[in-house]
């Protein structure tokens, strides 16, 4: 069993995004216990520029941005991933319902 503790901000760090900033309509499909898609969990706290390149390399494409929240679609896995960026890093990675990625 693998532990991925700390994959999502809990709002306790002075430079982190509060947990209340998590994107709406979170969906638990193919996620770790902390809510990150299993193929993206290692991107939490990664510098945003490199993490965005990794998202693309892993088959995700940008769909939309709402403030600090970005939505990414992966057609192969049919996962709508969300990232919350703060201070130049991915503070949280999670999933949202498909409609946030332009899917029905």
Image (cartoon, rainbow, N blue to C red):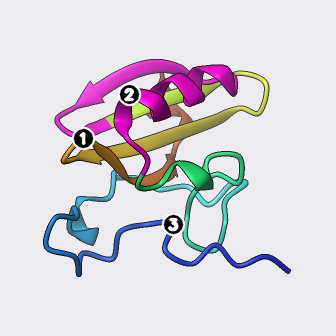
Residue 99, x across and y down, in percent: 48, 31
In three-dimensional space, the C-alpha distance between marks 3 and 1, rounded to whole angstroms, equals 16 Å
Q: Identify the mark nearer the N-term, 3 or 1.
A: 3
Name the one closer to the observer, 23 or 52. Answer: 52
Q: Position of residue 34 (x, y in %)?
A: 55, 71
The reply to whether residue 104 is visible in this rendering is no
Nearer to us: label 2 or label 3: 2
Between label 3 and label 1, give the one nearer the viewer. Answer: 1
Where on the picture, by quarter, is residue 45?
A: bottom left
- In space, the residues marked 2 and 1 are separated at their CA atoms by 8 Å
Q: Is residue 76 left or right of residue 22?
A: right
Q: Residue at x 47, y 55 (%)?
A: 44
The numbered disc on residue 64 is none
Q: Is residue 29 left or right of residue 35?
A: right
Label 2 crowd bin: few (<14), some (14–19), many (20+), radius 10 Å: few
Q: On screen, 50 above or below 88?
A: above
The reply to whether callout 2 and callout 1 are in contact (CB within 8 Å) is: yes
Provide the residue designation for mark 2. 49
Residue 102 versus residue 70: which sits nearer the camera? 70
Identify the magenta region: 46-69
Give the numbered dot on residue 7. 3
Percent x, y of residue 25: 42, 53
Q: Secondary structure at mark 3?
A: loop
Return the x and y of residue 3 as percentages of the image width and height: 70, 79
């Amino acid at each position: 069993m693998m532990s991925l503790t700390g994959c999502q901000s809990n709002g306790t760090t002075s430079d982190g995004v509060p947990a209340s900033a998590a994107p709406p309509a979170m969906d638990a499909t193919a996620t770790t216990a902390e809510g990150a898609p299993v193929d993206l969990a290692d991107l939490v706290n990664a510098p945003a520029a490199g993490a965005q390149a990794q998202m693309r390399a892993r088959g995700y494409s940008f769909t939309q941005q709402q403030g600090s929240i970005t939505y990414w679609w992966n057609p192969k896995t049919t996962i709508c991933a969300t990232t919350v960026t703060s201070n130049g890093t991915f503070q949280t990675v999670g999933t949202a319902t498909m409609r946030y990625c332009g899917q029905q």
